[in-house]
Image: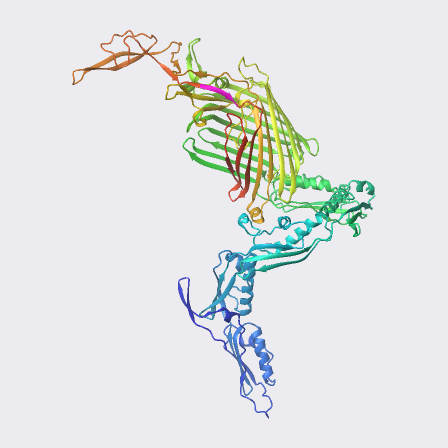
Amino acid sequence: MSKNRIATKRKSSLRIAAVLLGTSILAGLPQAAQAQEAPAAPAEAPATIQSIAVSGSQRLEPDTIRSYIKLRVGQAYTQQAADQALKDLFATELFSDVQIRNDGGNVTITVKENPVINRIILEGNKRLKEDKILPEIKLAPRQIFTRSKVRADVARIIELYKRQGRFAASVEPKMVLLDQNRVDIVFEIQEGPKSKVRKINIIGNEMFDDGDLKDEMVTKETGLTKIFSSGTSYDPDRMAFDQQKLRQFYLTKGYADFRIVSAVAELTPDKKDFILTYVVEEGQRYKFGDVKVDSQLRDFDSDRLAAQLPMKKGDWYDAKMVEDTIEKLNETAGAFGYAFADVRPNYDRNKDDLSMGITFQIAEAPRVYVEKIDVNGNTLTQDKVVRREFRLAEGDAFNSLQVKRSTSRINSLGYFQEKFEIEQKPGSAPDRIVLEANVEEKPTGELQLSAGYSSLEKLIFQGSVQQRNFRGRGQTIGLSLSYSNYSKSAEISFTEPYLFDRNVSLGFNVYRRDYNSFNYLNNDRNTTYKQATTGFQLRAGIPLTEYVSAVGSYTFNIDDVTLDKAQFFTNRQNPPTFECDPLLAGRYLCEAIGKRTSSILGLSLIYDSLDSRVRPSRGRAASVTAEFAGLGGSVKYGRLRANAAQYWPLAKGWIFSVRGEGGLIKSFENRGAGVDPVRLTDRFYLGEPEMRGFDIRGVGPRVIRQSIIADANGNPQVITDRNSVIDDALGGRYYYLGHLELEIPLGSGARELGLRPSIFLDAGAVWGVKRPLLQSSPFPNGIFIPARDSTGNALYQQVDTVTQTTNTDGTTSCTIATVSQVTSPTSAVVLPCVPTGLTAGVNTALGSSVAPFQEIFQGNSPRPRVSIGIGVNWNSPFGPFRIDFAKVLLKRPGDDTKSFTFNVGTQF
């Protein structure tokens, strides 16, 4: 009979008298009770069972307990039958103790039922939370406690920790007895450290050193350089995958006989680390022998196909090239309508000359037609939105290239989860196929919000909301707002991609944009000019071919460019006018002010073969846009812009892209001598965010106004500190911009977080503006600009009356009492005394003084500016997040640099 130790345990602030059972008790087997009966006389026959009584049961009915055994009334009672009854009752795992007693044929079964589990308690689990452990174990509240389940659950928890790489984990189960035959089960967990891979040994490799082979593996040796790597922990599945990686590496290098003799993982005695040992046999290196194609398809010429195969006789054998060739032949067969073509390679291995001949056999197959197209999984998106992207219709001949193109177009919608593929299933006959688009919708609304506060701009707010699948019809509708002390804008947009269910798109934008151009002087931000633009744009597009489309647009803008009159305007005498003063504003700003209207016609030709417009990984895109302003309005110019992009998947997760753009603008106006024909607000600008590493409008022509002060010896000294000069970007008539970017894959954990880092190189320039007329104010006194009245006369301050007082020491003081503005430089008022600093009979000229300065013109060069850096895209819980760190390698005098930028939004 089992014995329990009594212990006291406090849980949830309650004192519970309990018996704490150790692991040895829970894991032990119950000691079988011996049947107690009076020893029968050797000469007596076995007693006949007269009755079977059950005592000690609480939850189970006596009849239920009797049904578990084979003893029956009227049978002979034997020791063997009693022992079997004990075994049967213990096998139910419902009882912790059982006794059987026979008293002259009256059999009594005394049981002690196993307790009911009140709750399961986990202690010490920090790396694995309860929601990861409890669903994996068998024990649960309100179940009957059994020792076998405890043992199984202990093993299961340890197994869960082993999957996490914690092979030193231990679990000690304990039981706390409660009233009413209830218990709490406590699993005390010692998680232990995560077991790392201390060493990887490779035995048998002669042609490649250990470092080359370890680079192919996912598992890495622990070390300082791998401190952030997720591949240093031991994982049996990862180890099996590494064996496949080794085989693939050798097979691509021509070692067709390569095999892994053994792969062993040994746990160190301290259970902290593993040592992995691979024993390999490299074998001989093979070259391709005769490579042939044996096609049973009537549309395929075997000799012509063989001539186009990538491998040639004498090349080193490459198993990956063979696999790619099989896939390519299948795609080629699919393009001719053979959806179920069977391409099999037959190998002819010659160990004498170490050659590997291959014959690609293409079995005969029927042409296939599309029987049906099914769209599944779309709850919001209408079927027609998906179906209209299919390049095949029901009844068409099957074409694998068109299926691939359909997949790319559906992915480009951006309405569904990534990795979407059109499934191909057999139809009702051998020459029929069913295409299934099993989509999984994702949020297509996008909300971007940013807010902040600075001492210069005060409150900053930017927000936009866009729904790219409005009402499930594929329509795009958007609203954006921004506000700060220096910029305000509002815009509404709408696009219908299929007008009246025809392949014609139509869209419009209506906007109002108020922009204050600014510069910095030390820490003070100064507004240079204000531009208010109100306008709209209409767009219509039609496809010309599968990959080429044309988009026409009409834009009408009303622009008003102004300067602060109190800061930049003065009265001129000939003729008397109140106008912009180049000494205060700069001639280039004075030329920009005024109201004008722009009526712009545009036409774009667009080529797009990307596999996805949302996150492309292969394909190319290009566009050319021509705009003409002059059909009405007050502005006349022609503008041409072009851009192109190419994406290559280099390896799994590695995506390399090249993007470029450029443009030029030519004015059809004559704005006078010395004035650039293209207005300041119509030129091209370059900087953040287009070119990382540079500030907003930080690249290109600019006028820098530098102050001149006197040094210690009274000589002129030019202030060149970038924070102490006035810097105005002028833009240019020509520009180009290029990007090289490589997206780098991370481990599975980083992919689950949505992290996609990349390294990039940006290069570009903007130039071509006409050299402006520069201003200067001479050293040391600068320039005085007199104030004038409405008729252009210079104004003076005249002292009309003074106050004369006698001081305590007997001297007199003379102070100004009243003054007036006059147009005469001499005073007609005779004063009894003259205040200090004034001259008798002379009035003081009114106006403003312009301190000594000089203007320089910089940045008007087509030489490239180059920056490199690293960026990270993150699908954060707050929405899409992009952060970039850039280092400028090449710049020109005058360029403004900036090392860090980020942007954040969210989706709904």
Above or below — where is 80 with respect to 199? below
- The colouring scheme, among rainbow, by chain, secondary structure or one colour, is rainbow
Above or below — where is 331 with respect to 244? above
Q: Quadrant of residue 659?
A: top right
Which x, y percent locates residue 542? 67, 30
Residue 136 visible to the viewer: yes
Residue 68 visible to the viewer: no
Tell which residue pokes out farthest to the bottom in this image.
43
Tell which residue pokes out farthest to the front in this image.
206
Q: Nearer the viewer, residue 713 or 260?
A: 713
Position of 305 compared to 775: left or right? right
Task: Examine the structure image and report whether residue 125 is included in the region drawn in magenta.
Answer: no
Position of 296 compared to 248: left or right? right
Q: Quadrant of residue 149?
A: bottom right
The range drawn in magenta is 854-858
Judged by its main secondary structure, the magenta piece is: strand
